[in-house]
Each structure stands twice: as structure tokens, then as C-alpha cells.
Image (cartoon, rainbow, N blue to C red):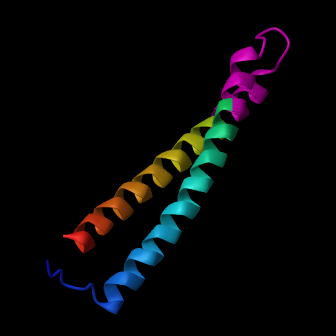
Amino acid sequence: MWKPHKSDTETIQIEILGIAELEISKKLVRVEKKLSKNSNELREMDIFQTTPKRRRNKRLILDAECEERDRLQRKLEIIKEWKEEIYN
């Protein structure tokens, strides 16, 4: 059965999106590792052994990492949507 060929631009777009998806997923894995490490550190901090400033700083770091994770996850969703548009 005859199938239409994808144009060169569509193939290049799919390749670029694939590379971007791979790089972003690698970054996402790194951020999730840092996130779990800092989350455990914050959880294990003793109220009587650490200062409020140190705990606050750890919460701020954790909050920034959560935002980074959410941003990367959103980028992956957008890339998947673009790939679906190209395939269809």
C-alpha cells in the first residue's frame, strides 16, 4: 500500500524535537534527584540543632527546585504535543 512520504522539514523537526526531549528528560532526572536529596535533608533537620535561617534557606532551595521540575515537565508536555501535531 502506498504511504505518503514525510517532507524533509517534518523529518528534521521530529529529529530536533527528539533530541530536545532527550536532553530535557536528562535534566529532569537530575533535578528530581536533587529534589529528593534536599527534601530528605530538610525532613531530617532537627528543630533544636539547626537555626530557623538554615531551615528557611533549605525550604527556599526546595521550592526553587520544585519550580524547575514543573517547568521541565511542562516543556516535555509541549514537545509531545508538537510531535503529535507533526505525526498527524
Quick one: 17 or 43, which is closer to the camera? 17
Q: Is residue 18 magenta?
A: no
The furthest residue to the right: 49
- The percent coordinates of residue 15 (x first, y second) are 45, 76
- The percent coordinates of residue 74 (x first, y second) are 40, 53
The furthest residue to the left: 1
Q: Is residue 48 magenta?
A: yes
* Quarter of the figure that contains the N terminus: bottom left
Quick one: 52 or 34, which is closer to the camera? 34
The residue that appears at 58% across and 63% down in the rendered structure is 23
For the record, the magenta segment spans 37-60
Quick one: 88 or 68, which is closer to the camera? 88
Q: Is residue 81 left or right of residue 15?
A: left
- The percent coordinates of residue 49 (x first, y second) are 85, 12
* Quarter of the figure that contains the C terminus: bottom left
Kindly report the secondary structure that dominates the magenta region of the rendered protein: helix
The furthest residue to the bottom: 8
The residue that appears at 71% across and 31% down in the rendered structure is 38
21 lies above or below 45 = below
In the figure, residue 24 lies in which quadrant?
A: bottom right
The furthest residue to the front: 1
Q: Is residue 77 left or right of residue 48?
A: left
Quick one: 3 or 11, which is closer to the camera? 3
Q: Is residue 87 left or right of residue 78?
A: left
- The percent coordinates of residue 35 (x first, y second) are 64, 36
In the figure, residue 65 lies in which quadrant?
A: top right
The residue that appears at 26% across and 64% down in the rendered structure is 84
In the figure, residue 86 lies in which quadrant?
A: bottom left
16 lies above or below 65 = below
Q: Is residue 80 left or right of residue 85?
A: right
